[in-house]
Image (cartoon, rainbow, N blue to C red):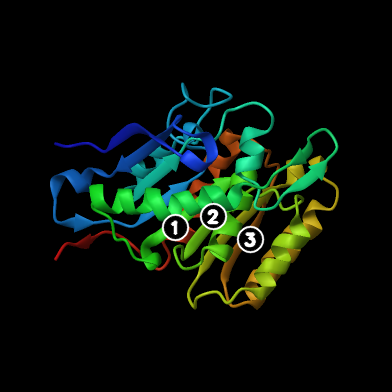
Amino acid sequence: MNAAVIEKWKTPIPRLTGREGRTVYVYLPECALEDRARRFPVLYMFDGHNVFFDEDATYGKSWGMREFLEGNGVELMVVAVDCNHRPNNGRLSEYAPFSFYAEGFGSVPGRGPLFMDWLTGTLKPMIDRRYPTLPGREHTFIAGSSMGGLMSLYAITAYNAFFSRAAALSPSVWFAGKRLRGLMRETDYTPGDVVYMDYGSGEMRNHEGILRAFTQTAEILAEKGVYVGARIVPRGEHCEACWEEQLPFVFDTLLYPGFGAESGV
């Protein structure tokens, strides 16, 4: 009997960190090894080091993604890319769709578009060549938390040609929220697009006005014709353990009405 596997390899992001290798995690479901003709939807994720393994996670606790997918028989691939661990706001800059200035951070250049150009222009074609993917946008999703959640909202907006569904857990919509919402208002989303959003009630205290920013973001998406699942998580906090608990809701939304593997041609 085969088991699901997680491949782990490095590749550079030249425009962001030169030749430095960035870790990529690729989850293949068990059925991919049992039937080589099958093809699968792909979920791209930010902060890849926090997705699968506690020993790789920043705070020693991952999302437990493998256990969830295997335990629930979810038939899709996950491609999770490590964040920028360099000092001087490396991650913050890479996951910022727009440049900004904030007390405690100073001036932070928004290099999110550079990261997304690499993900869609270099990484995705590489994954589609190497693995049994369903490459079309209707089977290509993106997800993340915190700044990664913000980037997921940005991705399905600015890179809508590539992604049809997004999950944004505890998205940092307090950051440059007006610019993102302005971009959303200007975007013609594709009919059938889906967005899952949540925010923990316990973390609302961290940023002034976050409830209003969160609800405004969900409202704009709905007005633009996007199918939105938006939740306030009771007592939810800003941590991987809480985000792991939301995975049933995430996948119920992303995979509705039953996206899954298909036979190869």
Q: Is residue 254 visible?
A: yes
Q: Is residue 161 left or right of residue 37?
A: right
Secondary structure under tag 1 reads strand
Q: Secondary structure at mark 2?
A: strand
Q: Is residue 260 above or below residue 146?
A: below
Residue 175 is situated, as x and y percent measured from the top left of the image, at 75, 50
Q: Are marks 3 and 2 in contact (CB under 8 Å)?
A: no
Of tags 3 and 1, the one toward the viewer is 1
Name the kind of residue labelled 3 in the image. Ala
Local SS, label 3: strand
The residue beneath circle 3 is: 230
Q: CA distance from mark 2 to mark 1?
A: 8 Å
Q: Earlier in the sequence, mark 2 or mark 1?
A: 1
**Which residue is labeled 1 in the image?**
141
Q: Name the foreground residue: 177 vs 54.
A: 177
Q: Amino acid at mark 2?
A: Ala
The residue under the point 14% across, 51% down is 36
Q: For the image shown, how many numbered marks are present on the structure?
A: 3
- Few, some or many residues within 10 Å of mark 1 (<14, 14–19, 20+): many
Decide if residue 218 is on the left or right side of residue 11.
Answer: right
Q: Quadrant of the C terminus?
A: bottom left
Are the residues at dot 2 and dot 1 in contact (C-beta closer than 8 Å)? yes
Residue pointed to by mark 2: 167
Question: Residue 219: x and y, percent?
Answer: 70, 70
- Measure the C-alpha gap from mark 3 to mark 2: 10 Å
Q: Quadrant of residue 139?
A: bottom left
Residue 131 appears in the rendering? no
* Residue positioned 29% across, 60% down in the render: 134
Quarter of the picture holding the N terminus = top left
- N-terminal of the pair, mark 3 or mark 2, is 2
Type of amino acid under label 1: Phe
Front-most of residues 58 and 104: 104
